């Protein structure tokens, strides 16, 4: 039964009349009378004694009103508690994020977030896979690359540049690739989360080429591919934030610069049907204002 019926009944007892109760509830007098008649019919008991001067509860009506007041008070308290979670900048927050991206790009900003929102208990789960946001209990995850699941909300944070790199030692032994077809004679370190069947996307101008490659090593972990490239094991496609320091220091060389990959978007992704808590809203507002690279 609609709780407005119960609230109307309690209001009639408090006000002592249908007219005053109707005014308090913001409904018509006839609807107020109907609520009480329906309630009595459903319970099969007289709850109110009506006279021309006032309305008073019966013994059953008085006992029933006491229980209803307690129930309605608890319901109101529960409702206010839930509302508070959507406004209060507090609570727990579980965010999934790629390992190397978190360590190289996000980590300093997480410290700022924790300083600003001291009442938010932040849990960062480092994961290079495509986590099941709902099934794994995440409030949101950070994903690098084009999104496939249209049932999720996404807020773009920034874009990352992808580079084709190898160590100077590897290039001295195997030579520098100059064009996409050259990759077929090179040892390639393949990121298994990359779309496509053993092909690498390369772009020249407005044209994108899906170049077949010959992988000698496979991994879904960026740090592992990075380590293999540093140790001269082959060519790797890696985000700029991963290799920036190594390129500056000469530990890795960028090759085939004219065949740059399209930049990949970085998105904060969260379930579309989940109530956004105050903690989640704080993180979302914080993240979209960051200057990330």
Image (cartoon, rainbow, N blue to C red):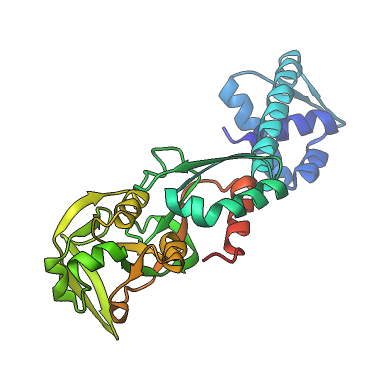
Q: Is residue 140 left or right of residue 216?
A: right
Q: Is residue 135 above or below residue 206?
A: above
Residue 16: tell me if it is visible.
no
User: Nearest the camera: 290 or 6?
Assistant: 290
Q: Is residue 162 left or right of residue 29?
A: left
Identify the image quadrant of residue 131.
Answer: top left
Q: Farthest residue to the bottom: give it.
A: 205
User: In the image, residue 78 lies at what x, y percent?
Assistant: 66, 32
Q: Is residue 81 above or below residue 110?
A: above
User: In the image, residue 169 lies at what x, y percent?
Assistant: 28, 62
Identify the image quadrant of residue 255.
Answer: bottom left
User: In the image, residue 139 lies at what x, y percent?
Assistant: 50, 45
User: Nearest the camera: 158 or 243?
Assistant: 243
Seen at 23% across and 59% down, the residue is 234
Q: Is residue 186 above or below residue 108?
A: below
Q: Farthest residue to the right: give it.
A: 53
User: Nearest the camera: 55 or 165?
Assistant: 165
Seen at 45% across and 38% down, the residue is 137
User: Nearest the camera: 59 or 271?
Assistant: 271
Residue 183: tell me if it is visible.
yes
User: In the image, residue 292 lies at what x, y percent?
Assistant: 55, 64
Seen at 87% across and 31% down, the residue is 53
Seen at 20% across and 76% down, the residue is 209
Identify the image quadrant of residue 80.
Answer: top right
Q: Quadrant of the N terminus?
A: top right
């Amino acid at each position: 039964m609609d709780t407005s019926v119960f609230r109307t009944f309690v209001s009639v007892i408090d006000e002592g009349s249908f007219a005053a109760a109707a005014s308090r509830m913001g409904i018509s007098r006839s609807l107020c009378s109907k609520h009480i008649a329906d309630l009595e019919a459903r319970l099969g008991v007289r709850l109110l004694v009506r006279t021309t001067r006032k309305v008073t509860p019966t013994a059953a009506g008085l006992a029933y009103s006491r229980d209803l007041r307690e129930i309605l008070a608890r319901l109101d308290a529960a409702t206010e508690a839930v509302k508070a979670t959507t406004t209060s900048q507090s609570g727990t927050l579980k965010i999934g994020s790629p390992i190397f991206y978190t360590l190289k790009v996000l980590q300093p900003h997480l410290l700022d977030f924790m300083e600003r929102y001291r009442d938010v208990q932040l849990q960062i789960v480092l994961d290079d896979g495509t986590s099941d946001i709902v099934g794994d209990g995440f409030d949101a995850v950070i994903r690098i690359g084009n999104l496939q699941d249209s049932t999720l909300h996404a807020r773009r944070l920034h874009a990352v540049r992808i580079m084709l790199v190898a160590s100077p030692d590897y290039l001295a032994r195997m030579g520098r690739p100059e064009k996409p077809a050259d990759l077929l004679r090179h040892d390639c370190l393949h990121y298994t989360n990359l779309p496509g069947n053993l092909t690498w996307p390369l772009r020249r101008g407005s044209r994108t080429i899906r170049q077949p490659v010959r992988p000698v090593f496979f991994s879904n972990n960026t740090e592992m591919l990075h380590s293999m490239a540093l140790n001269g094991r082959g060519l790797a496609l890696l985000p700029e934030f991963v290799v920036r320091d190594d390129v500056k220091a000469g530990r890795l060389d960028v090759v085939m610069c004219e065949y740059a990959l399209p930049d990949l978007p970085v998105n904060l992704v969260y379930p579309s049907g989940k109530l956004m808590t105050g903690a989640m809203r704080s993180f979302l507002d914080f993240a979209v204002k960051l200057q990330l690279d």
